[in-house]
Amino acid sequence: MKKLISIKVVLLSLILLNCTSDSDTIDVIEETELNIEEQQTEFDRSSMLSFWADSIIIPSINSFYIELNTLNAYATSFTSNPNSGNLNQLRDQWLKTYQKWQHVEMFDIGVAEEIYFKNRINIFPANVQLIENNISNLGFNLDDSYNFAAQGFAGLDYLLFGIAQDDDTIIAKFSNSSLNYDSYLAAIISKMIDLTISVKSDWEGGYRDSFIQSTDNTATSSINNMLNDFVFYFEKGYRANKFGIPAGVFSGGPLPDRIEAYNGEIYSKILALESTTVIENFFNGVSYNDSNITGLSIKNYLDFIENDVSEKLSERINNQLQAGRNKIDQLNTNFKIQIEENNHEMLLTYDAIQSTVILLKVDMLQKLNVSVDYADADGD
Amino acid sequence: MTLLLSIILLASCTKTEIEYRDVEVPVETIVEKIVTQTVTQTVNVVTPPEEYSFTRNGVSTVYYTGQSARLKMATALKSSMNILTSTQANVNDMFNNGTGFSDESLNSSGKKVGNKVGTSGSATVKPLFDGWITEFTTIVVPAVNNSITATRTVAGKYTDPSGAKTVYVNAKGFELNQILSKGLIGALQVDQIVNGYLSFTKLDGAKQDHEDDIYNYTSPGASEANVTKMEHYWDEGFGYLQGLDNQYAPGLGDASIGRDGANLNYYLSKINAQEKEIGITKRVYDAFSAGRAAIVAKNYEERDLQANIIKVELSKVIGYKSQYYLRKAAASIEDVEDVEWATALHALSEAYGFILGLQYTKGANGESYLTHAEVNEHLTNLSAGDGGFWDRTAEELRTMADQLQQSTGLSE
């Protein structure tokens, strides 16, 4: 490990000359800063940022974009030829694309942040009333923040699984073009593609370079923003949205209809596990395209700072992430059933995840000397 | 390696002459890291005030209306959990929605008790309270209203042979208003003070704003924001103890204008009467005052010192009372010929609630007396068997009390 020893030598030369006339005292202070470079230096934050951008963020967005296009193609197949084969093909692709999205949601930075990307792709539950109104009126504007809960994956979840009790009726609704389900489906997917293109172009344009060059530790630097995004995603997008809110941690009682992919029923656990992998991979610097390739990561950064510590924080974080994963593994495939039948296990899962929040938000950020840039609700 | 020293020599007499010379001095590469540093530190000396009174521009900056409201709610919930007209919907509204109280000011306060229960710990604790509410209103109330006499495995009403005590209990002998109320002392009040408002994370999270004199709150009577976040957090912690009593004096307030009769401050005052802890109410009050003064003086070390005194002292209430009620119950069932079951079930319910709170405490070593898992183990043992409390023996209860004495390091 290389270190920088910086010794500030302050030479104080104080020469007092007593003069008869003008001045009594003259202080001369000369400061000389002396940097003795003993080996080298500090954590290579620039390489970490490059790895994040080139091996995790950009490939994740590209992969999501590719799946979205396939989703679009299958949606067209289904609406032009509504049958159960095409419906199932579309649903499978919806899940695949939804899984890819889990890899993207965390990176709420740059254009993604400006256009409220995550709020438009994955706010759940969907506002079913709003969607039905939009479908019958067709006078909707998906860019209106009012409509954020009427699009994205939760909107698709409703269209593909929730508009009727059984598949035949769903297919029948899509078969009748005057009901507009087909055009609303196309509109939602088209909007998801447009938004993704904006984010993708941003990274492919100048944003990638400015992202990796911002290596300082200031409130607006990339590392600072990214660490905050990571912790925020863990606390809100992962802990609260996928577990805490449906389990009723923030309300009087459980709210099973708040699970992710509510209408699809059996996908909430798959998505939660995918998201767990995303978190583990980002923390440990695992490349998106090849899990055998790793690069500089938060774990390395922490280990660098804790060079002389035997019980490393990074290990405690990884162990706690694993404890959370083990809990999730035990849950019902359908979180709705889990909550309705044994919410206690859901709450214990939440506890395990909450323990990681404390490690990340308090211990990790303190070690890395980063301030939390989002506020908690104070209550009163 | 060379060290460049710039030495400026000033020579001056009647005419000022300055001569600069650059001198190259060879320096050994051995650099000793013995650096003598003169650190100028402004030590903000804190004079602890006589009373909890703090002003800015002549206006009091102290207010904790939200805490007073929640303590009133907790008191009302305790009553409602022993009233035979209570319904699940009504008590649930009081607990989770902050409505349905006879005191209208509470209904419009926007505050709730439910969302502040056990927030620092396991998410499995709060649903216990919901469960007790459901159990009392849907099982105990109908049983008592049907004049069922409670006995082992049967919910209903039980009166001691002496007639001195009557309890409404579930099939395991739980007097649910006692469990809920004592549970809130730990899971609401102690948790909010110890792990919430007076925690280092909470207070230090507001440090930058405090350093910059940024005012985020407006106290009643002020025309513009005049309280920093850190000051207000501390006041809210104070309010969770003193919210029903007198701001300007330790202990319980004046009975004529209403005071705490059911919550943390009430039990703190009881502890104050114990020989070993005489003066604990004043110690806690003075620590609140001194810590608040330290915040005003921006002396954070002193603040944390006082916070720690408060945490350790308040935790003792839970520590003492959890054992005390186990021993009290043991005494009531000791004489098998003349068991006062209502008295025993009442005491065991109090013990159960206080034991629940042990996970939110902070002992002198900085750790809670018991972990969440250890608390669950004690609660399971205490309520084991189909008969629950009815199945306990005096010996078992004394053993449990001894274990708690060990864990807390406290004895009467």
Image (tube, coloured by chain):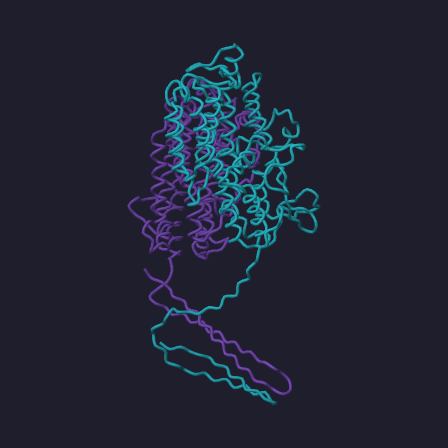
Chain colours: A purple, B cyan
Q: Between A138 and B353, which is closer to the camera in this rendering?
A: B353
Q: Give residue B130's position: percent from left, percent from top.
A: 49, 25
Q: Is residue A52 left or right of residue A187?
A: left
Q: Please, is residue B29 above or below residue B142 in the view?
A: below
Q: In which quadrant of the rendered image does the C terminus of chain A lie?
A: top right
The reply, left or right, for residue A316 in relation to residue B129 is left
Name the spot of residue A254 as percent of width and height, x first.
Answer: 47, 26
In this rendering, the answer to whether A340 lies above or below A51 is above
Residue with the most extreme left position: A292
Q: Quadrant of the N terminus of chain A?
A: bottom left
Locate residue B393: give its quadrant: top left
Q: Nearer the viewer, residue A162 or A267?
A: A267
The answer to whether any part of residue B114 appears in the image is: yes
Quarter holding residue A335 = top left
| Residue A172 visible to an observer of this rendering | no
Looking at the rendered structure, the number of numbered marks drawn on it comes to 0
- Tell which residue pokes out farthest to the bottom in this image: B14
Residue B165: % across, % down: 52, 19
Q: Is residue A55 above or below residue A43?
A: above
**Quarter assignment of residue B399:** top left
Task: Measuring from the top left, give residue B403's x and y in whole percent.
Answer: 37, 34
The residue that appears at 54% across and 84% down in the rendered structure is B10
